[in-house]
Image: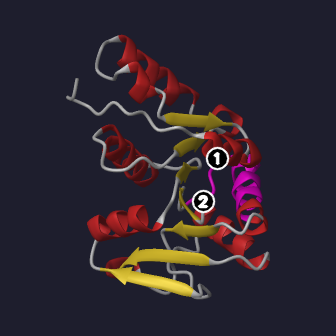
Amino acid sequence: MKRIAVYCGSNKGNRPEYAAAAHELGVLLAREKIELVYGGGMVGLMGIVADAVLKQGGHVIGVIPEKLVIKEVVHEKLPDLRIVKNMHERKALMAELADGFIALPGGYGTYEEFFEVLAWSQLGWHSKPFGLLDIGGFYRSLLEFLDHTRNEGFIRPQHRDLVLVADEPEKMLQRMREYKPTREVKWVK
C-alpha cells in the first residue's frame, strides 16, 4: 500500500483519545512510508492526522472542493493540494488515489464517504481494503447495526466481512495488509 485515504471528523470530538489516535495514525503512516490522502482541511481530526504525517516527513495529498477553500478550513502547508469542483469529484479522486481506506471517528461526512467506498467494493468496482478505527468503542453501535443488517438478509455475510475493524492504528494497518477481497459481487451468483 502506497497511499491510504483517511476519513475523519472536521471536529476533534469530546474524548482526547480520538485526537491521540489521529496523531498516532499519522505518525504510523509516515513511518511506514505510506502517503496520506484526505479531505485537505486543517481543522479537527483531519488537521491532526495531516500535521502528524507532515511533522514526521511523510507525504500528504489533500483533496478539497473549491467551496471549502477558505482560509479557516484549507490546510495551507500541504505539499500536494488538489482543488476539485464538488464533493462528488473529491470522493472519486480520493478513491482513485488510495490503495485502502480508514475511517477514524467522525460525523455524517465521514460515514457518507466510508459507506460509498464500501458500496463500491460490494459492487465489485474496486477490491481495496477499508476499515473502521474503533477508538474507545466509537463504532460499536454501527458494527452492531451492520450485523443486524446482515442477519436480516440485506447484506451477504462475505460483504459484511469487508469492513475491517481495529481499536488502534497499528492493528488496522496489519489487518489491511492481510486483507483478501471477496470474489462475490452483489447480484451475481
Question: What residue is drawn where x is 49% and y is 63%?
Answer: 98
**Is residue 94 shown above or below 135?**
below
* Coordinates of residue 175 in the picture (x, y in percent): 65, 40
Between marks 2 and 1, how big is the CA–CA gap?
8 Å
Identify the residue under disc 1: 177
**Is residue 102 shown above or below 152?**
below
Q: Do the residues labelled 2 and 1 touch (CB within 8 Å)?
A: yes
Q: In which quarter of the image is the N terminus?
A: bottom right
Looking at the rendered structure, the secondary structure element under dot 2 is loop
Looking at the rendered structure, the secondary structure element under dot 1 is helix
Mark number, residue 1: 2
* Coordinates of residue 14 in the picture (x, y in percent): 66, 48
Residue 135, picture quadrant? top right
Residue 44, picture quadrant? bottom right
Question: What residue is drawn where x is 71% and y is 78%?
Answer: 54
Residue 68, picture quadrant? bottom left
**Is residue 68 shown above or below 2?**
below
Question: What residue is drawn where x is 75% and y is 63%?
Answer: 32
